[in-house]
Amino acid sequence: MNQDFSKPNHEDSEKESDEDITATFLRETEVVEESVEDGKKIRRKGIYLLPNLFTTSALFSGFFAVVAGIDGDFTAAAIAIFVSMVLDGLDGRVARMTNTQSAFGAEYDSLADMLSFGVAPALVAFTWILQDIGKTGWIVAFLFMACAALRLARFNVQLGSTDKKWFIGLPSPSAAAVVAASVWTFHSFDAEALGYKVWMLVVVAAAGLLMVSNIRYYSFKDVDPKGPVPFVVLLAIVLAFVVISVEPSVMLLLLFGAYVLSGPIMALTRKIRGNRRKA
């Protein structure tokens, strides 16, 4: 029997149709960035995997903190926020080391930061103790989240126009850290005590307002990790790890609490010195 090759093969047609749909989908969802390099306009397709992989991991940790907070596992929630901090610090450094910076990566990082350092700390603090205070509790939690969003937006528009040695306002990861460390340290105690409720109200509100303030914080960006350092510096780092490992929640609270206070203290010191010079 002779086969009639003039008739279309339906299986091949369906396969070609599926391939066309897949190709169209990939083309329509492709990320295209335009940049100027050496005076030439360059269009780049796709995204860099390595730095965005760190950002995605930080985003996952932030989401895990939210879920753990809702489930009442506040230790896991606080630890997840600190993990997000570490990953958030790595993605930018990896991008600079591998020369894979991109506008997409910067925007993706900001959105991940909003969840990890804005939504997650506010929700964890609220589900632990702020919800017991009523309307004041959720207003303070919202204040922190809104200030984190404003802080990130201001940081993005001021990028490149400010002194890299200083942050203008408390960085959102540090604000999230002091809130997370407070929850981690005190959640196992009697949460019905008025002192813990007042403490969290003050910490969450103060951290939020400091994020949108004009108080300068040292950024540590002028520290060159590739350069030589005295032996005592390495010894101090080792001792810091040992001390933190003894009681992580308390030591992290003291560490980031000191950093949060460093901004207002330095601002007050500069003001006093300025007044003395005028006098």
Image: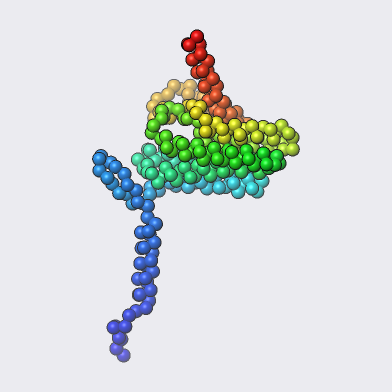
Quadrant occupied by the N terminus? bottom left
Query: Seen from this angle, which residue lies furthest left?
Result: 39
Q: Looking at the image, how many numbered discs can be counted on the residues?
A: 0
Query: Seen from this angle, which residue lies furthest top?
Result: 279
Specify the quadrant of the image occupied by residue 248. Answer: top right
Residue 263 % position (x, y): 53, 25
Q: Residue at x 61, y 35 (%)?
A: 204
Q: Residue at x 42, y 37 (%)?
A: 157
Q: Is residue 251 left or right of residue 8?
A: right
Q: Is residue 212 above or below residue 64?
A: above
Residue 187 % position (x, y): 68, 38
Residue 215 % position (x, y): 51, 27
Q: Is residue 271 left or right of residue 105?
A: right
Residue 178 % position (x, y): 59, 33
Q: Residue at x 39, y 57 (%)?
A: 29
Residue 220: tell me if it is visible.
Answer: no
Q: Is residue 9 left or right of residue 236?
A: left
Residue 14: tell me if it is visible.
Answer: yes
Q: Is residue 107 above or below residue 207?
A: below
User: Between 178 and 84, which is closer to the camera in this rendering?
Assistant: 178
Q: Is residue 122 above or below residue 245?
A: below
Q: Residue at x 25, y 43 (%)?
A: 40
Q: Please say which color scheme the image uses.
A: rainbow
Query: Seen from this angle, which residue lies furthest bottom?
Result: 1
User: Between 153 and 164, which is closer to the camera in this rendering?
Assistant: 153
Specify the quadrant of the image occupied by residue 194. Answer: top right
